[in-house]
Image (tube, helix red, strand yellow):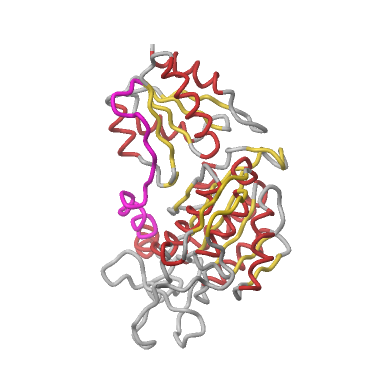
């Protein structure tokens, strides 16, 4: 039986999503967090900073979000599971170093508790308008993974999953929470250690003289060596060869960047996750995520009571997007209805994948609150006609 790490909670607790996220990080083995306070994410690091001393973890408040993300990248190269937490403007500031982490293939987790924007926007109120930024916010071509919890329980569970995915694919993983889930208090069950799957850092078994940090050895994800373990290597944000040394050529760019894409794209069937409710035989399918999925579930039940054949897909992994499934459904349904707390982001992915075979109707909300379920019902009924 695996021993519970010192200081990690177990059992049933009433926690908000921010606190649950912090507990999930600690349960996953995170022992380094760098961050800068920003509403509505600060409670995550408040929780961690109080509890880390009991388990040998390190929290450091950096001077800003650029430095926070840089510190996380550096800490990860010591072999330490590392995370940062932010919202809104801080997420924008982290984007350059998220791209650095993608290029260096640095396992790490970034939590974005979304609020209303743009700019300072609504610091204490909900938004979901960072979803495209999560995928495309840094420059250049890269792939990453983003998850979206709908409850404090999932804030715990998906934070553990985020760390596991980051270790498996050596990629930054984003947890795209929202203010409502972050500040919502519900019952959270924290299992014993032997019931939590934790993926360790995959360290190379090659001797220092034979190891190359970006040699793939038949698989798309290179082995890892910790800084300080006697391995001589170089890592950089520049286009690099198997040694990690910069190589300024189109051929090296093709090999280097193509693999950053391929290691996620080729494994998308294993990464993509969603929940389906009543989709089989439905005329209209709702697609939503985060707190909006809970409101959409209510709207689905109200529309079904009016005789509409309606089902729902709740995105759990948002990126990669479930392209194949949406394409298949577009052949069978009359329409998709996509409620989001923004003016149209993930609905664009539904439209792209449906390829004109079924319309995707947006139910927008500017932020600061959640949808009136009746507005979603009205769109469902109209789509079914």
The answer to which image quadrant residue 336 occupies is top left
Residue 58 versus residue 189: which sits nearer the camera? 189
The answer to which image quadrant residue 223 occupies is bottom left
Q: Name the residue rendered at 51%, 66% in the picture.
A: 237
The magenta segment is 259-283
Residue 255 versus residue 270: which sits nearer the camera? 270
Q: Name the residue rendered at 45%, 65% in the picture.
A: 105
- x then y, percent, for residue 323: 34, 39
Residue 19 vertical placement versus 288 (above, below) = below
Residue 17 vertical placement versus 163 (above, below) = above
Q: Is residue 280 magenta?
A: yes
- x then y, percent, for residue 249: 40, 65
- Tell me: 127 left or right of 248: right
The answer to which image quadrant residue 305 occupies is top left
Q: Name the residue rendered at 36%, 51% in the picture.
A: 271
Residue 65 versus residue 52: which sits nearer the camera? 52
- x then y, percent, for residue 292: 53, 33
Q: Is residue 96 magenta?
A: no
- Tell me: 264 left or right of 332: right
Q: Pick the quarter of the image with the C terminus.
A: top left
Q: Pick the quarter of the image with the N terminus.
A: bottom left
Residue 85 vertical placement versus 239 (above, below) = above
Q: Name the residue rendered at 40%, 34% in the picture.
A: 313
- x then y, percent, for residue 25: 54, 61
Residue 240 versus residue 161: which sits nearer the camera? 161
């Amino acid at each position: 039986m695996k021993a519970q790490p010192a200081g990690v909670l177990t059992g049933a607790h009433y926690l908000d999503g921010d606190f649950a996220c912090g507990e999930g990080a600690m349960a996953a083995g995170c022992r380094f967090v760098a961050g800068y306070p920003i509403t509505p994410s600060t409670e995550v690091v408040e929780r961690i900073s109080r509890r880390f001393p009991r388990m040998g973890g390190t929290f450091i408040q950096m001077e800003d979000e650029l430095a926070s993300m840089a510190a996380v990248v550096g800490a990860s190269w010591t072999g330490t599971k590392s995370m940062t937490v932010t919202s809104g403007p801080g997420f924008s500031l982290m984007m350059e170093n998220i791209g650095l982490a993608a290029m260096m293939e640095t396992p790490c987790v970034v939590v974005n508790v979304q609020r209303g924007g743009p700019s300072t926007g609504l610091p204490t109120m909900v938004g979901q308008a960072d979803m495209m930024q999560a995928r495309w916010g840094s420059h250049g071509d890269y792939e990453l993974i983003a998850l979206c919890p709908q409850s404090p329980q999932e804030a715990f569970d998906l934070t553990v999953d985020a760390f596991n995915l980051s270790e498996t694919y050596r990629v930054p993983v984003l947890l795209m929470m929202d203010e409502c889930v972050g500040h919502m208090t519900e019952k959270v069950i924290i299992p014993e250690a032997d019931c939590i799957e934790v993926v360790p850092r995959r360290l190379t078994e090659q001797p220092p003289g034979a190891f190359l940090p970006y040699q793939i050895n038949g698989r798309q994800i290179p082995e890892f060596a910790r800084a300080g373990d006697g391995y001589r290597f170089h890592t950089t944000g520049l286009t690099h060869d198997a040694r990690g040394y910069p190589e300024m050529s189109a051929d090296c760019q093709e090999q280097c960047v193509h693999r950053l894409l391929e290691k996620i794209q080729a494994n998308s069937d294993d990464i993509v996750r969603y929940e389906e409710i009543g989709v089989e035989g439905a005329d209209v399918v709702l697609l939503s995520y985060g707190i909006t999925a809970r409101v959409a579930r209510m709207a689905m039940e109200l529309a079904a009571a009016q005789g509409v054949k309606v089902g729902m897909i709740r995105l759990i992994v948002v990126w990669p997007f479930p392209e194949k499934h949406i394409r298949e459904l577009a052949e069978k349904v009359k329409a998709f209805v996509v409620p989001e707390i923004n003016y149209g982001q993930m609905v664009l992915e539904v439209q792209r994948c449906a390829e004109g075979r079924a319309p995707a109707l947006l139910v927008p909300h500017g932020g600061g609150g959640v949808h009136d379920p009746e507005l979603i019902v009205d769109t469902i009924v109209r789509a079914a006609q």
